[in-house]
Amino acid sequence: MNARVTRPIRIGLLGAGVVGEGILQVLSDHAGSIERRMGTAIEVRRVVARDSGKPRSPRCEGLLSFDPDDVLADPEIDVVVEVMGGLEPAGDYVRRAIEAGKSVVTANKALLAEHGHALIELSEERGVDLYFEAAVAGGIPVIRVLREALASDTVVALRGIVNGTSNYILSEMKERGLDFAEALSGAQAAGYAEADPTLDVGGGDATHKLAILAMLAFGAQLRPEDIPTEGISDVAALDIQMAARFGYVIKPLAVGAELPDGSLDLRVHPALVPDSSVLASISGALNVVVLEGKMLGPCLLSGYGAGALPTAMSVVSDIVDVGRNLVVGASGRVPQRAWRGEHLSKRAVAAPGRHVCRWYLRFSVLDRPGVLARIAGVLGAFDVSIEQMLQQGRGPDSDEPVHVVMLTHEAREVDVRHALREIEMLRGMVARARALRIES
Ligand SMILES: NC(=O)c1ccc[n+]([C@@H]2O[C@H](COP(=O)([O-])OP(=O)(O)OC[C@H]3O[C@@H](n4cnc5c(N)ncnc54)[C@H](OP(=O)(O)O)[C@@H]3O)[C@@H](O)[C@H]2O)c1
């Protein structure tokens, strides 16, 4: 049992950007109701940023510092709130805060996915809390649901759209007929995409979040690089139109499930989902996570996965949780990884080749006799059978390639990949074949 804190909970913020400013707003707008819920107030002692030349909001007045030690070495600060982002120096600061006996709240998914286990173990050793609700799907309380509400269930599968930037880009491509590059620059102009969008559109950000979700849902210790990841930058406007003609929408998915042999099926990639499905209805910058509990059945959580106020609300709710623990002199009652440390285990991620699903295949071919028969022959030789097919009519120029789209019955990924490699070498093929999974 730690000593009970009876005075206001004192916090120091590392970071005064989008989320940091949002936290200051939530704390000031909701000060009264937070105090009534927590039993004491939250007092911001210091806000650390990097660039002394940047204009700041009046909320930062009298609080700003450019020296992290003003937070890390201040013995009066109870909770360090890390909203700087990046692996270092954020990781070093979080470690130092924990070692100094302070609890930490962070929104940093990259840090959690890469070093979460070590940091959480350190916090357990030191008897302090490390909360991170905003690190996955921003304002959606999915971590609390997995950690607390489903503590008596077994999560058998989860599916989500957890990167708002990719979802916004694919939604814009569909709604406005834009190609990927146009939709990306629109997203950047609207503030939905970073100047360097690689982590978002390349799938890395969703992979970080899936690694955290898999830890909570399946008790899995894994490295984000073990998760097969594909971004959305290869999705063409034509694929979106063709998918729509078959009744599907292309969405950036993160998928996880426990397989009978104990390995995990974890994947991040764009996929076709039926246009009548819940996943298809989540458009723009919204996020969704659908959890499948053995007892509960499906449970859907949807909302804003980013943005100053939804994310800041989530961070402040974590501060309130830590504050409640400090008020009663407790920590570590709820394991931060949902499982007691000794019950987490390193888990194998199933090789993507084993995955079985239906496929969307698009071929660009010269419209010559026999081309389609040759494609179908190779697919058949690899046990990939065609369920539906559509050929986009050719123009007056017979040398202009035509697009042939095939939806397959269920097939193993390894067989589809081998077939595509052979098909690409056939006479009459003019571009790389495009393959997207269909998520039922
Ligand atoms: N934005 C969202 O909607 C969202 C949603 C969920 C999670 N997150 C996570 O929240 C974290 C913060 O995101 P954000 O959007 O608020 O980022 P941001 O707007 O870029 O703000 C980052 C802040 O950290 C400060 N900072 C960066 N490096 C620093 C250093 N070495 N020393 C001191 N201060 C430093 C920056 O200082 P200056 O102001 O001086 O540049 C800035 O105030 C990230 O981990 C992000 O992944 C964000």
Image (cartoon, rainbow, N blue to C red):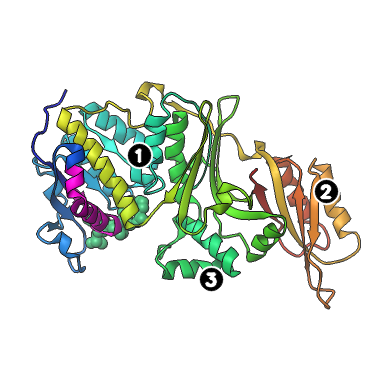
Magenta stretch containing residue 17, yes or no? yes
Q: Which residue is mark 2?
A: 378
Q: Quadrant of the C terminus?
A: top right
* Distance in Å between CA atoms under marks 1 and 2: 45 Å
Indicate the secondary structure of the residue bearing disc 1: helix
Which is more N-terminal, label 3 or label 2? 3
Within 10 angstroms of label 1, few (less than 14), some, or many (20 or more) residues?
Answer: some
Under mark 1, the amino acid is His
Q: Nearer the viewer, mark 2 or mark 3?
A: 3
Under mark 2, the amino acid is Val
Which is more N-terminal, label 3 or label 1? 1
Within 10 angstroms of label 2, few (less than 14), some, or many (20 or more) residues?
Answer: some
Q: Measured from the top left, where is residue 193 in percent x and y?
A: 43, 62
- Going by the picture, which residue comes out furthest to the bottom? 396
Up-down: is 5 above or below 170?
A: above
* Distance in Å between CA atoms under marks 2 and 3: 36 Å
- Residue 130 in view (yes/no): yes
Q: Residue at x 12, y 29 (%)?
A: 4
Side (left or right) of 91 relative to 281: left
Q: Which residues are magenta?
A: 12-35
Magenta stretch containing residue 174, yes or no? no
Q: Measured from the top left, where is residue 110 in percent x and y?
A: 38, 47
Q: Residue at x 65, y 39 (%)?
A: 353
Up-down: is 116 above or below 310?
A: above
Q: Which residue is mark 1?
A: 115
- Residue 111 in view (yes/no): no
* Distance in Å between CA atoms under marks 1 and 3: 36 Å
Indicate the secondary structure of the residue bearing disc 2: helix
Which is more N-terminal, label 2 or label 1? 1
Q: Quadrant of the N terminus?
A: top left
Q: Which residue is mark 3?
A: 182
- Name the main secondary structure of what is drawn in magenta: helix
